[in-house]
Image: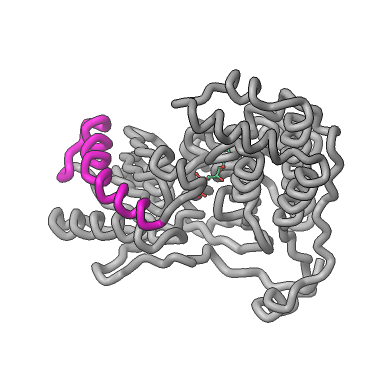
Amino acid sequence: MPDATILGIESSCDETGAAVVRSGREVLSNVVASQITTHQPYGGVVPELASREHLRAIVPVVRQALAEAKHTYESVDAIAVTQGPGLTGALLVGISFAKALAFALEKPLIAVNHLEGHIHAVLLERQSGNGDLEFPVLALVVSGGHTHLYLARREGTSWTYQNIGHTRDDAAGEAFDKVAKLLGLGYPGGPIIDRLAPHGDPAGVKFQTPQLKHRDRRDREKTDADPEHPRFDFSYSGIKTAVLRHVKVQNLSPAIEARRKALAGIDEPKIEDYLHLCDRQTLDLVASFQRSIVDDLVARTLAAAREHDVRTLFVSGGVAANQELRQSFARKAEMEGLPLFFPSRALSTDNAAMIAAAAYPKFLAKEFVSMDFSAEAGMRLGAVVRSCSP
Ligand code: KG4
Ligand code: ZN
């Protein structure tokens, strides 16, 4: 396959990313400017602030990525950019910049689905080449905005995707963020809960596994019946409500308020600060919440893997950085004899190397976009596989 060096640009949410990747796998540079400190006081991403921060960061981030890769604007073969899903204003910053570069440099422009980027992040670290990869691959993309299961196949150099499950309400990362906020632990919640959970008892609080027996009306309207396979949907808003109920019943609110205030007064709180501010009850709650989400993600994904007789499992997206999730998947996949691949923890969360990686097959297939393409906030990946209730 011909070599190609692609400059990738990512600006779908709260990270401005630029990266230079050779032939879909060799990361020459990967620069990410995080906006966490901008959004932290608000406890979540503020779309207007995100666009403003992307505008500020995009030029220096792209320049740094080229410099670190020892490349120039002229020496890359193509420009790739995230088209969606994401925040429209944020996406448009990356897209406008990528279009301007492609136009001025007369380089091909490639539009990439952010979710496909998360899936291809896995390939960046498979050193053995991907000729040995066995298909179909089952890919779980688990992030702040998505908990999606895709069956991925390869036709020639192109990849195709079928969605066989998604969250019916909150994404898993969203549940981590909301529960952390609820417990006065700050934003983003996933990394904090990840570090606190080993200090609590995961059996301390009993949470019910989400039951998804009945498809709601909106869902039924969106889907046709597929007698072949059930869907493998997720739901995490119930567990968030259960945490809220637990907080009320156990009267944890005064301690939560005190913790929130204390953490707001610490510049960059360390794990010791969090531990100092969390009693046993809170640590048990955090550990039990994480255990419940991890068990559900692993069980549903492996059930889907068996149903579709897949040959390989990918787990990617921000929540794939979670230690307990990685360990649990590793254990269970091994028991099933299923090859399992994660991106490194750094490439699990949003970055532009994954966008440049996903763009490579499109470069080979000459799947370029014209200057009139635009952001697609609700962009889907592949076909939705339709089915009756699981
Ligand atoms: O993929 P990502 O960077 O952005 C989206 O596309 O959403 O994922 C961000 C999400 C956030 O909800 C964050 O709390 C969660 O991933 N996350 C984690 C961890 N690191 C990030 N969740 C659990 N454990 C982690 N270590
Ligand atoms: Zn993402």
Q: Quadrant of residue 313?
A: top right
Foreground residue, 216 or 22?
216
Residue 333 locus on image (x, y percent): 74, 38
Residue 319 locus on image (x, y percent): 60, 42
Point 83% across, 50% down: residue = 209
Point 61% across, 38% down: residue = 184
Q: Residue furthest left?
A: 104
Left or right of 112 in this view: 339: right
Up-down relation of residue 281 to residue 177 (above or below)? above
Q: Is residue 50 magenta?
A: yes
Left or right of 183 in this view: 361: left
Point 75% across, 74% down: residue = 216
Foreground residue, 90 or 69?
90
Q: Which residues are magenta?
A: 47-74
Q: Is residue 93 visible?
A: yes
Left or right of 130 in this view: 222: right
Magenta region, mostly helix, strand or loop? Answer: helix
Residue 1 locus on image (x, y percent): 38, 46
Q: Quadrant of residue 202?
A: top right
Residue 137 locus on image (x, y percent): 63, 50
Point 74% across, 60% down: residue = 232
Type of colouring: one colour
Q: How many numbered marks have been drawn onto this rendered protein structure?
A: 0
Foreground residue, 375 or 21?
375
Q: Is residue 125 magenta?
A: no
Up-down relation of residue 116 to residue 274 (above or below)? below
